[in-house]
Amino acid sequence: MMVGVSEFLQKRRSVMARNMTAPGPDAAQLRDLLSIAARVPDHGKLAPWRFIVLQNDERAELGKIAAAALNDDSVAGQFGRAPCVVAVLACPKPHPKIPRSEMILSAGAACMNLLTAAQAMGFAAQWLTGDAAYEEAVLKALGGEDGDEIAGFIYLGTASEAPSERARPELDDIVTFGLTK
Ligand SMILES: Cc1cc2nc3c(=O)[nH]c(=O)nc-3n(C[C@H](O)[C@H](O)[C@H](O)COP(=O)(O)O)c2cc1C
């Protein structure tokens, strides 16, 4: 029986990249996932995001670039933890009315849509940044331009181990009805 959207969202969990194995999405599934990722609220229809798909050797190539930039060999293999990694770039553009922060938020929404869609399709997925996400050399290798930011690396694969539940904030701590007096 198909799980309803609400029930799915209530139980959805990320799987840690180190608990991922093959397969990742095939070409048709990836196309569906990326179409969903791009179907997000976007003030001014600026499409301020880009998706760079890394599979096969490209993962190690980017790992090498990250390791050199960070002077840390331990990061070289990080993109190899999943069969497919999608780098999501936030590409804010100067605009007379729309603040940059709204474009960054839209890129975050694209990350979340990709994550959720992949999980709904039965894949293991995790949204990670890590130090590599803040390296100029990594941004440039992904085709990013000055002012662009890496919103996240979305790792996609198959769970080798089911995730356990993790603590969530108490609603009373984060929700207020009405104004603060
Ligand atoms: C922008 C962003 C960057 C993240 N980067 C990392 C990271 O570098 N390392 C890490 O362990 N978790 C990172 N996380 C958290 C993971 O995505 C973690 O799996 C997530 O909090 C689990 O949430 P979920 O089960 O609700 O999907 C990041 C989350 C976000 C939103």
Image (spheres, rainbow, N blue to C red):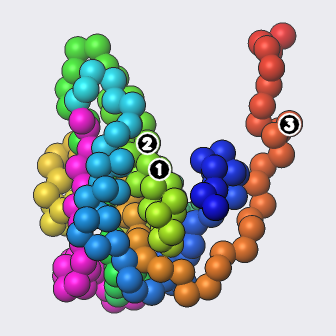
Quadrant in which residue 58 is drawn:
bottom left
Which corner quadrant holds the N terminus?
bottom right
* 7 drawn magenta: no
Q: From the image, tell me which residue sits under label 1.
A: 112
Q: From the image, tell me which residue sits under label 3.
A: 172
Q: Amino acid at mark 3?
A: Asp
**x 34%, y 72%: residue:** 25
Q: Amino acid at mark 1?
A: Met
The label shown at residue 138 is: none
Q: From the image, tell me which residue sits under label 2.
A: 109
- The one nearer the camera, 164 or 74, is 164
- Contact check, label 1 and label 3, Cβ < 8 Å: no
Q: Is residue 111 left or right of residue 162?
A: left
Tag 3 secondary structure: helix
Task: Please state the extent of the stretch shown in magenta in the rendering.
Answer: 47-76
Q: Select label 2 or label 3 by which is in front.
A: 2
Q: Is residue 167 left or right of residue 98?
A: right
Mark 2 surroundings: few (<14), some (14-19) or many (≥20) residues within 10 A: some
Q: Amino acid at mark 2?
A: Ala
Q: Is residue 38 left or right of residue 115?
A: left
**x 40%, y 86%: residue:** 22
